[in-house]
Amino acid sequence: MRPVTRWLVRLHKWAALIIGLQVLAWVAGGLVMSAIPIERVRGEHNIAEPDAALDLAGVMAPQDAAASAGITPSSAELRPWLGRTIYEFGRDGEAALIVDAVSGEVLSPIDEAAAIAAARADYAGEAEIGAVTFFAEPTWESRRDMPTWRVDFADGEGTRLYVSTATGEVVARRNDVWRIFDFFWMLHIMDYSERTDFNHPLLILASLFALGMSLFGFVLLFPWLGRMMARRRLD
């Protein structure tokens, strides 16, 4: 083997060892994410049937409800919420606001009791609530750019529901299976902070490097095959 070729082979081995660790993480992540049903990751088996009934008795016009709340909304949605009929008003540059569509009472931001009620209405099981925590800022787990209440259920699955203080809706569902999935997702996309970006330079560079190492390995393979075939002919 020529000195240059020997040096290239040594370089390829060390480079392949380094990138091989990331390839292993990609394979392990792909295996885990394909083996775990995504419905279980999302906690869909614990989602209660939504209350589709909408009582229109005594409902005021959206402009009247907005005037009662003292706002100028950019959008309005009429929907049921915890036995009430409410308007959810969108506001440019500000958090949404929910208002009782009958009384005009402003319900945002919701308090702890309302957050618990909203979480219980969303949860299909009978588990007790283990803890309730308020977050003024987004967390690594919720990844929602809004204040939220987190309601933890003692159901053995680590179910945690994040309820928006502005709209009273469950905006994120988390559990222990989700955390396992999310860890391998982080390794898979190599986004170790936000865990959402799969188009960043580090991932692209690692992918190109792995592709280059694979192609270079094939190039080095041909001389080895030639030597093996030559030895066989001599034998």
Image (cartoon, helix red, strand yellow):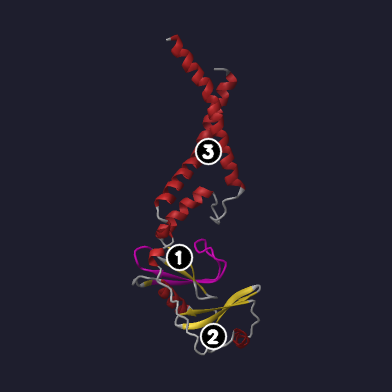
Q: Earlier in the sequence, mark 1 or mark 3?
A: 3
- Observer-side mark, 1 or 3, equals 1
Classify 10 Å Cα crowding around label 3: few (below 14), some (14-19), many (20 and above): some
Dot 3 falls on a residue whose secondary structure is helix
Q: Give the amino acid at mark 3.
A: Ile
Dot 1 falls on a residue whose secondary structure is strand
Q: Quadrant of residue 63?
A: bottom right
Q: Can the viewer see residue 184 in this picture?
A: yes
Answer whether residue 8 is magenta in the image: no
Q: Position of residue 126 (x, y in %)?
A: 33, 72
Tag of residue 101: 2
Q: Earlier in the sequence, mark 2 or mark 3?
A: 3
Q: How many marks?
A: 3
- In this view, the residue in front, 100 or 77, is 77
What residue sits right under mark 3 in the picture?
Answer: 19
Q: Residue at x 48, y 44 (%)?
A: 26
Q: CA distance from mark 1 to mark 2?
A: 28 Å
In the picture, the quarter occupied by the C terminus is: top left
Q: Give the amino acid at mark 1.
A: Arg
Q: What span is in magenta?
A: 130-157
Relative to 175, residue 68 above or below: below
Q: CA distance from mark 1 to mark 3?
A: 34 Å
What residue sits right under mark 1 in the picture?
Answer: 173
Q: Residue at x 46, y 41 (%)?
A: 24
Q: Residue at x 34, y 64 (%)?
A: 156
